Image: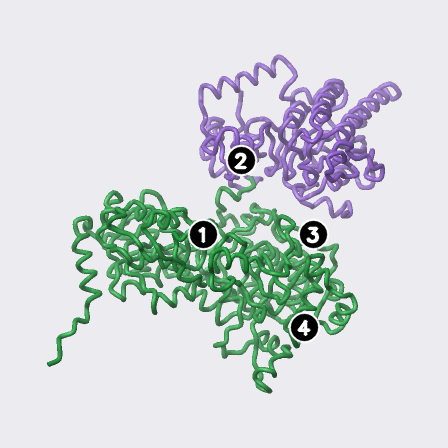
Amino acid sequence: MSKWSTLQSRSFLESSARERALGLVDEGTFTEFVGPFDRRTSPHLEVLGEAVEFDDGIVTGVGKVGKTPVFVISQEGRFIGGAVGEVGGAKMVGTLKAAIAFADKIAAEFPNATDEEKPVVVISFETGGVRLHEANAGLLAHAEVMDQFQRARGKVPVITLIGSKVGCFGGMGFVAAATDAIVMSEFGRLGLTGPEVIEQEMGKDEFDSADRALVYRTTGGRHKYVMGDCNAIVDDTIAAFRAEVVKLAKLPVSAFEAMRRIGSEALVAKQLKGVALAAEMQPKDARDVWKHAGNADPIALANVPLDEFRSTVKRLAL
Amino acid sequence: MKTQKKWDNLATDTAERMAAASQFIGNGKRVEPKDIVGLLEAVIRPGDRVNIEGNNQKQADFLAECLLKVDKSKIHDLHMVQSAVPLAAHLDLFEQGIAKKLDFAFGGPQAGRVAKFIKEGKLELGAIHTYLELFARYFLDLTPKVSLICAFEADREGNLYTGFNTEDTPVIVEATKFRQGIVIAQVNKIVDKLPRVDIPAGWVDAVVESPRPFFVEPLFTRDPALVTNNQILLGMLCLKGIYAEYGVQRINHGIGFLTSAIELMLPTYGEELGLKGKVCTHMILNPHPTMIPAIEEGWVDTIHCFGGELGMEKYVAARPDVFFVGPDGTLRSNRAYAQTAGHYALDMFIGGTLQIDPYGNSSTATANRVAGFGGAPNMGCDPKGRRHVTQSWLKCGQELPSMPEQIGTMPRGKRLVVQGIETFGEGRDPAFVEELDAWQLAKNAGLDLPPVMIYGDDVTHIVTEEGIAYLSRCKDMETRMAAIRAVAGFTPVGINAKPEETRRLRDAKIVMTPEDLGVDRDRATRDMLAAKNIRDLVTWSGGLYEPPARFRNW
């Protein structure tokens, strides 16, 4: 494991779940929950004769960013594509519960606590969704996580970070969409059905999963930023993601309502406007939507350095 | 009385054929796409030797598909003499009986069908060659009568611009046209003025603007995101134990992730070892995108290319101090010249393989695929005709204890031929085997010899994650086999290694482990790479590299 200071300049895309968890919070503040030494491995994989991991592919714990207690959930794509099973799912749920309980305790014992002294949850997604080897338990975990989001709402902000190799797909795409704020890098990908599955079901003419430029401009960070599916697009370093967490952690809980994608009648109405626009436009490619949003040259915009993208891009107004 | 002998039979024959084809050929030798099948039926006769241009990169694919549509009763039993048969159409010709015999160098994606057709008797195999070997035979006993070539552009007179992807075109056209043969070109576009003339109109008989641009495979693009820590370890061993040890300056990097890893570590680990200016200064290489960081950091004096590489056009054009760029400002690749330089003038060839046997013979053949050789054997061998001296060539020759057995006290150099391979490859198959699959293939496809990519007596170094076997330092076959066993890990070959024997080899510096070489395994991580993904390469190139869509990660 690299030192905290060297982790900061590291590529977020290249970093393991534990490196991300450690690097996102202040130096030396991370305490892991149910770490590898506890050896909570998946009972289902063992029955199937599959390899297990001592952390079940998810790193959970708590640390600090400035004065803010930060509960961290970080998924590891190199273990079964980051798929969520029973143990990993329980670790996610348990961490969310701990964050909510901690927020309740602070509210009860320290009524004068400032916004930045109240806890937040950060989830670094790297997953294709449910682990098929233990699908029922995995699906249940998805539901339980969503349930905890409802309990956390207005109390503990839940911040999503997406910039790892696998991206965030499948059921976990829904889960990410239900959080309060989403931060991505241009290499991050967010969606429901993964590119290969779309191709398999609908054919190469519908979606060519080998065309990575197509995959990225449909699910990647730049497109999600244009669409408003993510709130911020940052450079590919742990430090850049961390800086965004630092910024968000200071905000009052109420500020997160405006960043959400779902969860109110107004937001439903807004999403429906998007559906109506799609029906009216019949876009053939993400580029059509970029153009509609006011970007005259979408091809160039997809290629310019990220700084230039951020300063010149027009985002879709619904 | 002496009878009048005719000395222009070839030209007369060509003139007859061209007369029959004249109805299809308009101004500037132009033929409409719809008339190509008719044209081919007019100029090709049964049993002709025919070349369809194509290699592991560009393909005259439109002409190949047109040849497939000719009337089989008019054209059949052709003898195809061509670099490669990677397109389905190339093999369909045999399926349909239009072609009968094949002399080639590279099979590519159709390798399985080549083996199957040989077995079924649909394809009579002449020989499997290297590129250079096949080009040589174009000028000896395999000269094509009709060649179907491809170019980027033609002008109104029929001059051709092959540009960045010139590749095999000059050698095919010269062999064909100077034996009075017929040259037909498919071009992407007919224009008023060409950037430069690569093939003069006088050597071209017909030009067609193809309905879509010719196919080019970006075969030499390796995504840095897929380089593994193990490949990085192998790369570090190579840099410290071979590049630095011998000071190799004139190099070809084979295709594969190990050499990509090395390219991406020149500005990092190579810099740390102080190798800049001392190694990799002259290279015979396609425009590998993974070379961009090293080029930008000033490692490389010159690169000559076999072919182009999609997306590298602008970058290469903007670095004329390094690449062979014409007065018009674009690269001219040339496979024949690059292979000649690769055969005679390199100090080292380094590449991967699929299997190595206990003697050090290596092969990429599998039991049911006739994959061919491409160019690797010409670079992965010790060229016996070489006479000029470079320091690393001489050093490797001086090391060789077996040399006096062959030429007494006479000093001589030797090319470094390095095979880098993980002991267990893709699909967890062992890389070191008791018998190469090439033997089984020879049996299955009825070949005269098992196809060996690089023979054991040419290999000087084998590099695995266990360490380096310096075969150049082995005095006899027994020592070579012991050195190979020592780095073969837990493969069927490696498990026969004896610890005390390996110890002796390590003491004699015939085998060097990472620890012997002072390479820290813990540092073999992706942090060593100067670029970690395609986007990084674009950034290094200042936006000049334009990767094909399928390689983008943004």
Identify the amino acid type marked 3. Answer: Thr
Q: Residue at x 40, y 57 (%)?
A: B330
**Dot 4 corresponds to which residue?**
B478
- The colour one sees for chain A in the rendered image is purple
**Dot 1 corresponds to which residue?**
B314
Separation (CA) of disc 2 from disc 1: 25 Å
Identify the amino acid type marked 4. Answer: Glu
Separation (CA) of disc 3 from disc 2: 28 Å
- The colour one sees for chain B in the rendered image is green
| Residue B73 picture location, percent across and down | 25, 48
**Dot 3 corresponds to which residue?**
B525
Mark 3, chain letter?
A: B
Q: Give the structural element (helix, strand or loop) at label 2.
A: helix
In-front residue for pair B101/A37: B101
Q: Residue at x 62, y 79 (%)?
A: B402
Q: Give the structural element (helix, strand or loop) at label 1.
A: helix
Toward which corner of the image does residue B356 lie, by quadrant?
Answer: bottom right
Q: Give the structural element (helix, strand or loop) at label 3.
A: loop
Using the rendered image, report if marks 1 and 4 lie on a common chain.
yes
